[in-house]
């Protein structure tokens, strides 16, 4: 059984741009825009438009922006890449069942035989043409195919193909094909392959055929198990079997309205039965949903309609009542993320009649992981239900919970997210943060800094030099209007941040922990050229 591999180059960038366009209903981002995916402030993936401007993998963000100022910066998100690759898997399954996902942007199928053969084209070339035509209709323009006796060779062949074309390796020709490739192709296998490719190049081995000429014993002793696997592949000894996936069950539920409904209350009342059917369908398969995508289609005369779509998350799992609440909040807020234009709501009336509401499971988990304990859920369940009732009354964004994140100041190390929403895009806590205040953390963090002043024994305002040195020991200080002597103090912790954003955006500053003779402790911040403020208090 021969294997065909479909490869979509730079899929992480493509998925990021698709999601960005989906979020910006008014001004969608074109997939052809120069864009990069960043991890640890370095470029890990860049598309063709960015490479044409001189952007390369491994560059720092500032270098990439220097070469291409209009480049779109995207964060690395494997879950996003897999989510947007799901429609590609479904599109291929419509033509050729037995799809085996390899990773987001790459899949394999058993190579079709004579069924797709046309005049002048072999069965595999014709099948690739049919799949390419089907994928282009689904919005995937850059798709490349490779066909060979084994999976590894088919992947290498796909990487050599042009857009919407197929590279076919003849039967029994895998070893000959691989031996003609440069050793640098191993870098596509990840860090282990890049390390082996660099070692072979430094040893003077230019082609994989040169590597295959070595003895098996020498390869095993010198290059380890990975090198031995590559050596066997180049000799045509690999036997690969595809792990074809089982298509996921259809769990989505929808309800259409004829005539369309113009009231948010009427829509939420009408979707109750559909929400119960959606939850029951999950329960029949011993599943629960912790993330659900709600789509509402609008009737818009003269514009062809539109869609308001949002993915909602739950701290535990959704019930039918939770889904009805989310529909109500979404219609009231007018959260259009993938329609032709945003529509706001006015009270219980919406600007355009709703023709359809659809529930799609975004994240499902085994029901056993969310089952109640032997004696029930207890206080936790009561808290969740109570907060949900408050949220239903005051609104989705009105109930927020604090979440810890990385940062230097006390204010930077916390943020607020709506109840039930999983925090995303937080700064990592485990990274080094030079200038960070040591523990214990202050008990009160002020939304805005309070007026303060610190002077030395001579009554001169204390300041910090450019080298981070205190001009004088703090002797007296005030927060507000009341002066008092300093009982003890610690610091400074100087930082120089965001100076490149201009005046008022950051610059040189330092923080002190100061304890007054009354026993109260404060976190004070000095900012260049000489102002003081109280950021937090230790109660």
Image: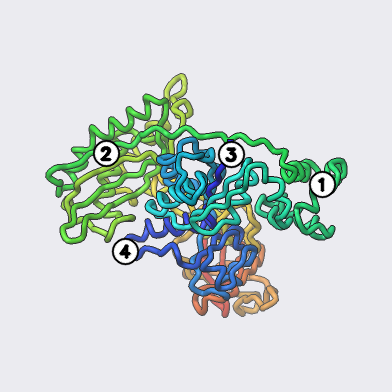
Tell me the quarter of the picture where residue 91 sits.
top left
Judge the density around disc 1: few (<14), some (14-19), many (≥20) Cα neighbours within 10 Å.
some
Q: Does residue 7 appear to the left or right of 279 in the view shown?
A: right
User: Label 3: which residue?
Assistant: 2
- Image point (16%, 58%), residue name: 301
Closest to the camera, between mark 2 and mark 3, is: 3
Residue 254: mark in rendering:
2
Question: Could you say where residue 31 lies in the image, as x and y percent from the top left?
Answer: 44, 62
Q: For the residues marked 4 and 1, what is the alpha-carbon distance in whole angstroms?
A: 54 Å
Does residue 377 sit above or below 471 in this rendering? above
Under tag 4, what secondary structure?
loop
Does residue 497 sit above or below 335 in this rendering? below
Question: Could you say where residue 371 lies in the image, as x and y percent from the top left?
Answer: 44, 25
Does residue 524 sit above or below 335 in this rendering? below
Residue 491: mark in rendering:
none
User: Label 4: which residue?
Assistant: 26
Judge the density around disc 4: few (<14), some (14-19), many (≥20) Cα neighbours within 10 Å.
some
- Image point (23%, 58%), residue name: 344
Quadrant occupied by the N terminus: top right
Earlier-in-chain disc, 2 versus 3: 3
Under tag 1, what secondary structure?
helix
- Image point (46%, 36%), residue name: 97
User: Label 1: which residue?
Assistant: 223
């Amino acid at each position: 059984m021969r294997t065909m591999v479909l490869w979509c180059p730079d899929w992480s960038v493509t998925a990021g741009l698709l999601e960005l366009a989906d979020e910006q209903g008014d001004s969608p981002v074109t997939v052809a825009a120069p864009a990069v995916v960043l991890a640890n402030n370095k470029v890990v993936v860049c598309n063709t438009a960015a490479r044409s401007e001189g952007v390369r993998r491994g560059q720092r963000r500032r270098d990439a922006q220097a070469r291409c100022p209009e480049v779109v910066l995207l964060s690395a998100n494997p879950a996003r890449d897999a989510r947007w690759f799901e429609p590609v898997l479904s599109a291929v399954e419509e033509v050729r069942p037995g799809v085996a996902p390899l990773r987001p942007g790459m899949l394999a199928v058993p190579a079709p035989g004579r069924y797709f053969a046309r005049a002048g084209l072999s069965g595999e070339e014709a099948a690739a043409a049919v799949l390419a035509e089907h994928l282009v209709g689904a919005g995937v323009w850059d798709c490349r195919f490779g066909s060979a006796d084994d999976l590894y060779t088919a992947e290498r062949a796909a990487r050599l193909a042009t857009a919407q074309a197929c590279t076919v390796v003849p039967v029994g020709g895998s070893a000959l094909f691989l031996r003609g490739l440069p050793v640098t192709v191993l870098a596509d296998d990840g860090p282990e392959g890049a390390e082996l490719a660099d070692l072979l190049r430094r040893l003077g081995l230019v082609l994989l055929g040169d590597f295959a000429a070595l003895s098996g014993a020498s390869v095993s002793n010198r290059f380890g198990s990975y090198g031995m696997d590559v050596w066997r592949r180049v000799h045509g000894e690999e036997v690969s079997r595809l792990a074809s996936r089982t298509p996921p069950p259809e769990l989505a539920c929808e309800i259409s309205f004829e005539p369309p409904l113009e009231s948010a209350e009427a829509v939420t009342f009408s979707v109750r039965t559909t929400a119960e059917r959606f939850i029951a369908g999950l329960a029949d398969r011993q599943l629960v949903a912790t993330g659900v995508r709600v789509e509402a289609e609008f009737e818009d005369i003269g514009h062809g309609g539109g869609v308001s779509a949002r993915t909602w998350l739950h701290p535990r799992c959704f019930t039918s009542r939770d889904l009805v609440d989310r529909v109500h909040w979404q219609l009231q807020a007018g959260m259009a993320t993938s329609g032709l234009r945003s529509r706001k709501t006015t009270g219980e009336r919406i600007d355009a009649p709703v023709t359809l509401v659809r529930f799609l499971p975004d994240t499902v988990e085994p029901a056993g992981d969310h089952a109640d304990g032997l004696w029930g859920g207890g206080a936790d369940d009561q808290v969740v239900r109570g907060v949900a009732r408050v949220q239903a009354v005051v609104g989705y964004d009105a109930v927020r919970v604090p979440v810890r994140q990385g940062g230097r100041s006390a204010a930077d190390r916390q943020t607020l997210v709506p109840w039930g929403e999983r925090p995303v895009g937080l700064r990592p806590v485990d990274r080094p943060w030079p200038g960070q205040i040591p523990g214990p953390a202050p008990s009160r963090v002020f939304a805005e800094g309070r007026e303060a002043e610190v002077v030395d024994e001579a009554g001169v305002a204390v300041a910090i030099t450019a080298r981070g040195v205190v001009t004088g020991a703090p002797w007296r200080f005030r927060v507000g209007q009341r002066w008092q002597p300093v009982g003890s103090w610690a610091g400074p912790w100087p930082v120089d941040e965001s100076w490149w954003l201009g005046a008022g955006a950051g610059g040189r500053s330092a923080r002190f922990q100061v304890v007054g003779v009354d026993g109260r402790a404060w976190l004070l911040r000095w900012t260049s050229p000489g102002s003081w403020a109280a950021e937090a208090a230790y109660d």
